[in-house]
Image: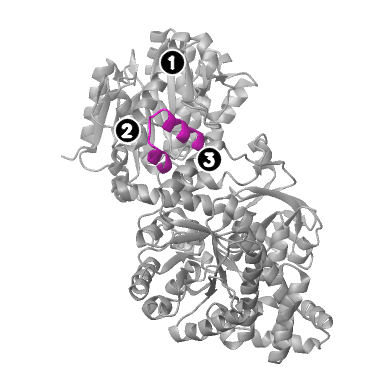
Amino acid sequence: MTRLVYGFGGGRAEGRGGQKDLLGGKGAGLAEMTRLGLPVPAGFTIVTDCCELYAAGGKWPPGLEKQVRAAVARLERTCRKRLGDPKDPLLVSVRSGAARSMPGMMETILNLGLNDRSVEGLAALTKNPRFAFDAYRRFITMFGATAKGIPREEFDAELKALKRGRADAELAADELRALVQRFLALYRGRVGAAFPQDPWIQLVDSVNAVFGSWMAEKAVTYRRVEKIAGLRGTAVNIVQMVYGNMGDDSGTGVAFTRDPNTGENSFYGDYLVNAQGEDVVAGIRTPLKLAALEKQQPRIYRQLCDVKRRLERHYREMQDIEFTVERGTLYMLQCRTGKRSPAATFRIAQDLVKEKLISKEDALQRIGPADIERLFYPVIDPKISRSDLVSRKIAEGINAVPGAATGAVVFSAKEAEAAEGRKVILVRRETSPEDVGGMHAAQGILTATGGKTSHAAVVARGWAKCCIVGCAVLDIDYEKRLMKVGDTTVRQGDVVTLDGGTGEVFTGEFPLVQPQLPEAFRTVMGWADAVRRLKVRANADTPYDARKAVELGAEGIGLCRTEHMFFDTEERRLAIQEMILADTVPARVAALAKLEPFQRADFEGIFEAMDGKPVTIRLIDPPLHEFVPHDREGQEKLAHTLGIPAEKVERRVAQLHEANPMLGHRGCRLCITYPEILDMQVRAIIQAAINVKKRGIRVFPEIMHPLVMDAKELRILERRTRKVADEVLKGAKIAYTVGTMIEVPRAAITADRIAEVAEFFSFGTNDLTQMSMGLSRDDAGRFLPDYVSADRAAVFAEDPFQAIDEEGVGALVRWTVERGRATRKGMKMGVCGEHGGEARSVKFFHRVGLDYVSCSPYRVPIARLAAAQAVVEEKRK
């Protein structure tokens, strides 16, 4: 028969700490602590497979009842007590415990085994009726709420009415006895039956409730947000109860073996005298700092310190522990890897290496992308209470870019730009390239539509601006300059605060604080740089972005989007719009001549910032309709400024309309139609390179043509590029190269022929994903959530615009690498889509042999770490 139950306690454990997938994290921890000789109450674990089977069939799998009954009998023998015994009852807790920590997401029931007879026996045995009836009322509450769905608030209301401001410990035994009767009446009224007196029925219903909590909405949502996939379900742990609420020589606590906020090697935690574990977690009483236990119960504190040392030596990691003291005896109830702040993550990793508990490679493997990302963004002051936040929350969207921002609401990019130093939040239904000026000026961005890779999200991430997208509850009225969220109206000028970490929107201003980069961050990132093979570049469009990228460890620029430079000032926007509206080649050339000095100056600033590092410059990419106004007022204003009829502007805008601009007249196709654009941009690049070289700055420009689909197409562009560049050089020596983006599937398939022309490939995985999968990254948010889930039955485990689709899009990348290098041996290849800053994708790019990844400046450290982790994982395999 398949083993479904594993026992522990009494100095013996049938499971091991390495069996988390089978026993869950809590069960594995209890088994391992037992093996280490720590004081663990006796109990047993029902394996995670049973949860999966219960969810599928609605009943216990064959053999489980027999094994649970046998485990209960063993537990009774170990404890020398029986469940339901009216004189000396055995009481147990029933707790969940999945392979991955999901704090607060699933259910716990304490004091199981109490009934109307055994509570009297417990009161007589302990000579503490107050304790016995307090335990019974807790059990009725948890069982009623968890197993029978009675709103916990109804029990809490009865308790609150009795307490009248007093603490739990101040309630007398007679008061608690009367409260139990009210709870039993409440239970009968809600369920339609008396509270079960048979401990076996209590146990079965409680186990089923824990199984059922696996698919509760909050647990499902948590797994989706945390990208927890592939788990069988939760294990169930039935453990002998030990009591921290038996008097002043008892208590309960939660502790971390190191400070989870700073990472300092100091015992950190809370302890409650005369209380049960839920009292600490629920926050219903103010606990003592763990240091106070040293004075009150020095022997227990010394025992805990010994446990701390033993656990850290064994697990080689900071631990989060739960413990109870019952009448002067210590019991360990749980240990698991402790959650910590980003700063603490780096401090602990560094210190564990110094203490020779782990290697540098181990340290690198323990840090995740979120640990790095959260270091760089301002946050709402943690001194603000959660109740203050909740009272002012009005909406919640998709947390596209972490951090926080506060400012006055504006509903147009122009108004954001005109803010003149005032802090503003730009609110739009969605953003477009026309909005980038306002986006740059705003403190934060809030949109009603879009996903984590929408235009707003991608641009905001590059600038490290707090951004919330897909906030569908926003009803925006541009004419009235207001938005409604339910019954709340926010008008232009009203102040709001965005929390990009949670996706929450609040009315009013909350103070923000800037986290400080810990010294340990630089140490650990130095270890990563010494290990990795893959180079890391940044996507940067301005000298400021380039300097920030170098500061964060970028080894070059993998994508400089020249069209972003057109929006920096009104003069630049007018020049590009004048070019678009021109009727003749000479007129277009004249308009472009106004842009050229700006482009040249920008390139000089970028080359200076990247002194000696390669810079990949993408020529114009978006369709021209994105540069012109589409509303009547904007068209008339542009016509007046340029001195041309408004009808001409309106007619030209209509001509530029495309049914599907993603597949339309954009990218290199613009330079095929309007080669004068290519001429201007190449001249600006090469002249800038010449100018900075004269100032002693090393420069390595890489000129990139986007959206190429055929070798002949690229040959036309490459020849013109070299002709213009050589005319500017006039014998000067600048080591420039000409290459292309691989973002059209046909280009990937014919990579061997395109490589005959291109000197380098850069994968634009945003567009390559769109075109390969037939998905628009801006529109797919309407239905993609139905495809993406942590559920094993879902189409995708992760959003393909966030993590590379290895089977499909990744196969095209692999094919391109092999075919391209078959033609041009050692050809330089990189990636510049958003996937270049996503850890799992970076590891894939390492495996397929790319030379570099490029990402937003603030994701450069994430890519550096992931590239190092890829090497470590490769070695260990």
Farthest residue in the front direction? 731
Report the amino acid beneath label 3.
Phe
Q: Residue at x 40, y 15 (%)?
A: 330
Q: Badge 3 local density, few (<14 within 10 Å), some, or many (20+)?
A: many
Q: Mainly helix, strand or loop, the magenta region?
A: helix
Q: Earlier in the sequence, mark 1 or mark 3?
A: 1
Q: Which mark is residue 762?
A: none
Residue 828 spot, x, y in % from top left: 43, 67
In the rendered structure, the answer to whether residue 437 lies left or right of residue 671 reads: right
Q: Which mark is residue 521?
A: 3
Farthest residue in the left direction? 1
**Mark 3 residue element:** helix
Q: Which mark is residue 28?
A: 2
Magenta segment range? 345-365
On the question of residue 198 being in view, the answer is no
The answer to if 492 sits in the magenta stretch is no
Mark 2 vs mark 1: in front = 2
Q: Earlier in the sequence, mark 3 or mark 2?
A: 2
